[in-house]
Amino acid sequence: MRITDLLDKRSINLNASPKTKEEALNEAVALMAKSGKIKDTEAYKKQVFKREEESTTGIGEGIAIPHGKCSAVTKPGLAAMVVKNGVDFDSLDGEPVNIIFLIAAPDTKDNVHLDVLSKLSVLLMNEEFTESLKSAKNVDEFLKIIDEADNEAKSIDARLEATSGNNAKILAVTSCPTGIAHTYMAAEGIEKAAKKAGCAVKIETRGSGGAKNVLTAKEIEEADCIIVAADAQVPMDRFDGKHVIECPVSDGINKADELIQRALRKDAPVYTSKNAPQKSETKKGGIGHQIYTQLMNGVSHMLPFVVGGGILIAIAFLIDGFSVDINSLAEADRSNFGTITPIAALFKGIGGAAFGFMLPILAGYIAMAIGDRPALALGFVGGYIAANGKSGFLGAIVAGFLAGYLILGLRKVCEKLPEALEKIAPVLIYPVVGILVTGLCMNYIVEPIMGIINTGLNNGLASMGDSSKLLLGFVLAAMMAIDMGGPFNKAAYLFGTGAIAAGNYDIMAAVMIGGMVPPCAIALATILFKDKFTKEERESGPTNFVMGLAFITEGAIPYAAADPLHVIPSCLIGSGVAGALSMIFKCTLMAPHGGIFVFPVVGNALLYIVALVAGTAVSTLLLGILKKKVVQ
């Protein structure tokens, strides 16, 4: 897309003569409306004036770039005004404005226009370019001047990325509330000032299209000083212990030379963050710490799907529990518990849809933490295969790491390609080759291995059924907690449902109680042992009571995925104890699902509750002992 693609001839006035800033903005909005890209002119105008209240868009040197981003804009667009006599625009330098470019940005995820707008913003900082625009005799000449400049200019992000490996000792971050113009103009100003001072600088831009040219932990650690020129929120914890200059984004445009000189002198306070990790923690563990961080990125994004979907499914069971007498149902209909009444079916369908995203999200965001955005698609595909195959959440974790490191490998390979091919790698080579390789690895390596494990588990369970009911109860219930929805869990659950068909109802009772313990124990542990869980885990913990009591083991998955070496053994032992006690108490269950909502049909229900409480207590105590304290 080119700059002139956003300009409509009807939206250009080379002889404007507004008397005040308000008149100038009203005329510019009227010009924009002529382009047909605004469906609600008043709503758009309100947004433009609201932005102006935050800080003036008169950047100085006779230029103003007002803008509005909202749903009233149907297509991205520009309106241009040349005010030859100038107008007082409350500019940063106090001088009148001669050129006004009004930006209209739709409130959508389609950000293809942002590079174009950032390029225009930077061009307007070139005095020769702006003088040419003011001297244009007609609209066609005006557009031609812009088009010719567009041919020669690169986008600011592309140029900054090309110089990112310069071992810069000065770093900068620029950001404005809408992230359209001032973000990039400040970056341009700081870059020019650094070049003039003979020093290298790396600049992270945080515009509407997201963060670009992001500063790495290594670069931050080695930097002498960091300039944060921003009017919008910027992640600051990463700068703990560094000299940081904090200033408005306008200073990056008009006071860039001063900022660079201050940075060279380290004339800035040392930033201190209460939320920043301790230095020893960030360095401790090396590769292990990186893997943990990558895993947690997947877990944190997966958590809303687990909580939202799990609660909705629990509500479905609750509705059927109050609406249907399960004793009156035929044995075949009991397997439909949770979908018998229409409203229950609706809730279970929505909750099930959320659960369907759970493992692809887990794998996708693990992959993204390793290989950035190109790895996201690969992780989603690998997670989907795991969710619909035999490998479950453990397979999704493998898929996430596989996808992330596959992208890192592809990047190294593509670096050796000709420049023309290297540029298309993110949109062609990474997705096509990456998804293919991920799919092949999942289908021909991960899934077959889990299939063998599943078959072995089923055969082993069948052979031990008559020898020891107590041991069988412990093993089946423990299997429900090993992978919480994966091959072990599914093998135990299928064995339990098969036993119902054969008239052995004690086995299903042990299976269900084994699946109820992990979420219940997690919920209780987050209350009793707060220092062993992160803030996010503590806030989500109580919802596991609902999921656990509804026999939704998946509620514990985020906690198991975040700390498998301590959470899984704790849950496994507690579930095993509950399953063994269920067998000892001769509890029976004729329904294959439902949690507490099917307790009315449990044989020896009171002792079944005792077994559940005992198993939950054991797991909770082990979680408190085994889990390490979280460093805030």
Image: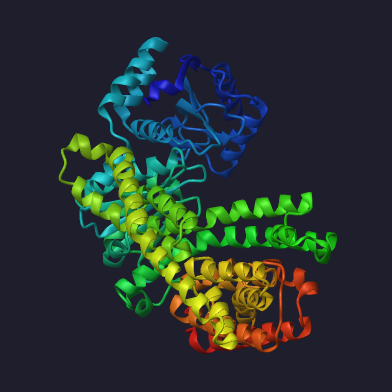
Residue 624 x/y as whole percent: 55, 87
The reply, left or right, for residue 394 in relation to residue 348 is left
Judge left or right: residue 178 versus residue 617. left
**Whether residue 568 is situated above or below residue 104 in the rendered picture:** below
Q: Is residue 622 left or right of residue 200?
A: right
Total labels drawn: 0
In the image, residue 448 sits, relative to residue 426, either above or below, namely below
What's the colour scheme?
A: rainbow
Work out whether residue 163 or residue 12 is closer to the camera in this orientation and state it. 163
Tell me the quarter of the picture where residue 447 sits.
bottom left
Q: Is residue 624 visible?
A: yes
Point 45% across, 51% down: residue: 230
Q: Is residue 484 visible?
A: no
Question: In the image, residue 587 lies at what x, y percent?
Answer: 71, 82
Residue 289 coordinates in the image, percent (x, y)? 36, 73
Taking the image as shown, residue 515 lies to the left or right of residue 596, namely left
Residue closest to the eye, 200 or 90:
200
* Residue at left offset 30%, top offset 74%: 286
Q: Position of residue 191 (x, y in %)?
A: 29, 46
> Could you tell me which quadrant the N terminus lies in?
top left
Asked if residue 40 is positioned above or below residue 465 in the image, the reply reads above
Q: Nearer the viewer, residue 396 or 5?
A: 396
Residue 346 or residue 374, whichever sits in front: 346
* Quarter residue 450 falls in: bottom left
Question: Which residue: 65% across, 73% down?
Answer: 508
415 above or below 397? above
